[in-house]
Amino acid sequence: MIKFSNVSLIYPTSTKTILEDLSFSIVEGELVLVIGSTGTGKTSLLQLINGLVPHHTGGILAGDITVDGISTKLVRPGELAHLVGIVGQNPAQGFVTDTVEEELAFGMEALNLAPDLMRKRVEEILDLLALAHLRNRAISTLSGGEQQRVAIGSALVMHPKVLVLDEPTSALDPIAAEEVLSILHRLVHDLSLTVVIAEHRLERVIGFADRIIHISGDGNAKIDLPEIILKDANIAPPIVHLARALGLSDVGLNVRDVRRMTEKIREIGKEVDNVLPTLGAERILAKDLTIKYGSSVVLKSLSVTVRAGEIVALMGRNGAGKSSLLTALVGLQKPTSGTSHICGTASTYLKGKVRRETVGFIPQEPSDLLYGQSVVGECQQGDKDNKIAPGTTFALLQRIVPSIGPDTHPSDLSEGQRLALALAIVLSAQPQVLILDEPTRGLDYQSKALLVALLRNFSKELGRCVLIATHDVELVAELADRVIFLADGEIVADGPTLDILLSSPAFAPQVAKVMSPRRWLTVADVIAAMEA
Amino acid sequence: MKSLHPLTWWIWSLLIVGAVIATNSAWVAGFAIAVAAISVHQFAEDAPWAKSFWFSLRLGAIILVIRTVIGVLIGVPIPGTALFSIPILPLPSWIAGIRIGGVVTQERLLSSIHEGLIIIAVICLFGAAVSLTSPHKLLRVTPVVIYEFGVATVIATSALPQLVQSIGRIRRARTLRGDENPSWRSIAIPLLEDSLSRSLELAAAMDSRGYGVSRKRSRYRPIAWQQIDSIVLASGLFAFALALVAR
């Protein structure tokens, strides 16, 4: 179905080869997973399939790519629209209409399909992706997860033979991600759809993949069965790390297999104690927060307290009100009623230097914080704002991502590098409170480990408080002391990470599922228990 | 209220622009700006691009000030009532006919403001059309033939709305970074960059969804021409006709 013959790709402004002499073919009805560290060219590889690279991005392409026998070099991306459906990394930037129904119909209208056929297909997709209740909503008012489902729907509605997805589950909560992936799995098996997915959260997709393409970053790429690639790849889900740490002979790819291999281990080993952090003064104090948009109530009289030295994770399904709560806490949005104080000051009154030193906020799109023309320019602005020695912010950034080029434009950075830049700027003011909205979107395991170390250090050594809204259960298991669980604008659970994560299987990390009923969340927990 | 046909406000704006230019009167220009402001205030939906009009109004005001200052300083003197006098800058003899400084007459000042107001009216009416129409809907009704110009069409219709959204985004970023009153200079280039790259992304997205491939487009929900569209259009036509007669 898709055939790459001796494909090499290089962008004119860069000296690095993205892909070098890559040849492989994907047969019909195969689900192929593309993995690689951030910034290695996964997105480029995906966009080569429908010709967006090089038709829209420029770049020098050698070799040939054919999709269903059509060479992408010879036709415009639009002429492959009936054949290839593509969902970008950031669906919000790819929407071309205003409401859900119009968005679903757009591609079919462009291809001049008959109106009654369009109606039928739109209804099918609305049901398939559980979007029916949102059909007339304006897309800009949907939550990140809902937007993701609309984007997938508008690609599926064209009945393409190939579906290309760039991190389709990064904005979805674990349950929604599971639903979307099982729909794809069904389409692959029922209709022999060919699917190519790039994803960082391997724990979510690994069970569905037929083969893996591993891009190593130096231009080389390997394609093989998951078991073989994951045996020695540096990118691996927690379950593989568990198998490696325990010295198991085989790499299991799903919970069932690894459970069978670790029966003995579950019987020995000590329980880990629930270590509670020493807490300082109240830093975030919100009382009876209510937010209404028109007639819909997003937050219902919600109260939250976070203390110094504490790392709190805010979890919940898509559209539960997490982002609204965060924007109200930092004072970007005035609540309909209720108050929010940070370090004793009402958050809407925080201005200038005091704001920088009190609260740092990293929004869902880290690029929303950036407006300079180069990495070094952004860092200088940070130095100037906070009146610290020139170069301090850049030094901090280099500690997080050593490879970053000082003259790179922020929009040319990879998702992970952009987050690091935003984080360095925010941290250069040494805020008392750090709030992050979905920080692990687009981050590979390596950058995630760095983020965990950095945040833990920031919170524990300096006694600062950190609040993270996230869907990433693995991150929560590694990092958080306490979890607040939101549903429908209300707090439904609030307690130590261990208790909350183990109470529902959907939100349990992979290691916990393997080790159940033992109360271990991470590979480190299991190792500690073995040694005790 | 159900939204109007995407072309209604554009045609209406063009007609009013025609009326303003035909009468060539500052009073008509001022009146047109007021009418546009009221229409935007009344009919604009709560959408990001709805702020385009107020942005264009501000842009117009800046242009008026710059134009008036330059118009008064440089150019051919117009005789009349002298208001005040500024020293004449000596210029080399080979650019005869151009003068910088000198006596500023009332006629000179008025003609500068007069021309400026007409330019503002044109800019504001364009802004009003952008404010009142979803750029996405407008793209859906543009004939596919125009898409031969491809990316340019998308950028032309979506650049101003994107620019206005980018201003909001950058202002939010500066608030978060504790810098409430940034200088215009520091955000002008990121602003243009941001809005252009978003327009390009929109063009790429439309291309990969098959826009412009088929010469004919079918309609999922036909965009109907309603009575209210005719009323708005009739008011524009009436104004234009009146301007032609009154000229």
Image (spheres, grey):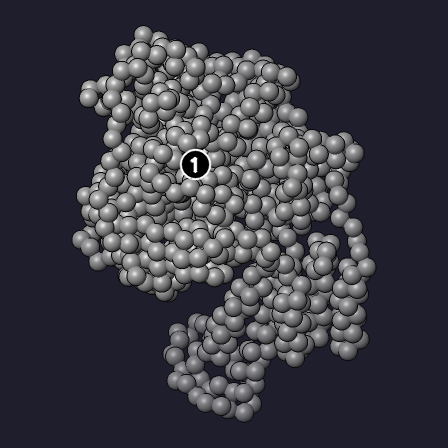
**Considering depth in this image, is B86 or B208 the residue closer to the camera?**
B208
**Badge 1 sits on which subunit?**
A
- Is residue A17 in view? no
Where is A310 relative to A56, above or below? below
Q: Is residue B85 left or right of residue A81?
A: left
Q: Position of residue A374 (x, y in %)?
A: 33, 46
Q: Residue at x 32, y 57 (%)?
A: A342
**Considering depth in this image, is A460 or B147 the residue closer to the camera?**
A460
Q: Position of residue A104 (x, y in %)?
A: 65, 37
Q: Residues within 10 Å of mark 1 (few under 14, many from 20)?
A: many
Dot 1 amino acid type: His
| Quadrant of the image occupied by residue A364 | top left
Q: Residue at x 55, y 28 (%)?
A: A179
Identity of the residue furthest to the top in this view:
A249
Where is A387 relative to A529, above or below? below
Q: Is residue B113 left or right of residue A14?
A: right
- Is residue A509 in view? yes
**Considering depth in this image, is B215 or A524 the residue closer to the camera?**
A524
On the image, numbered disc 1 is attached to which residue?
Answer: A471
Q: Residue at x 63, y 59 (%)?
A: B45
Q: Secondary structure at mark 1?
A: loop
The quadrant the N terminus of chain B occupies is: bottom right
The quadrant the C terminus of chain B occupies is: bottom right
Q: Residue at x 78, y 61 (%)?
A: B228
Where is A222 relative to A521, above or below? above
Identity of the residue furthest to the bottom in this view:
B81
Q: Position of residue A7 (x, y in %)?
A: 46, 19
| Quadrant of the image occupied by residue A9 | top left
**Considering depth in this image, is A143 or A117 the residue closer to the camera?**
A143
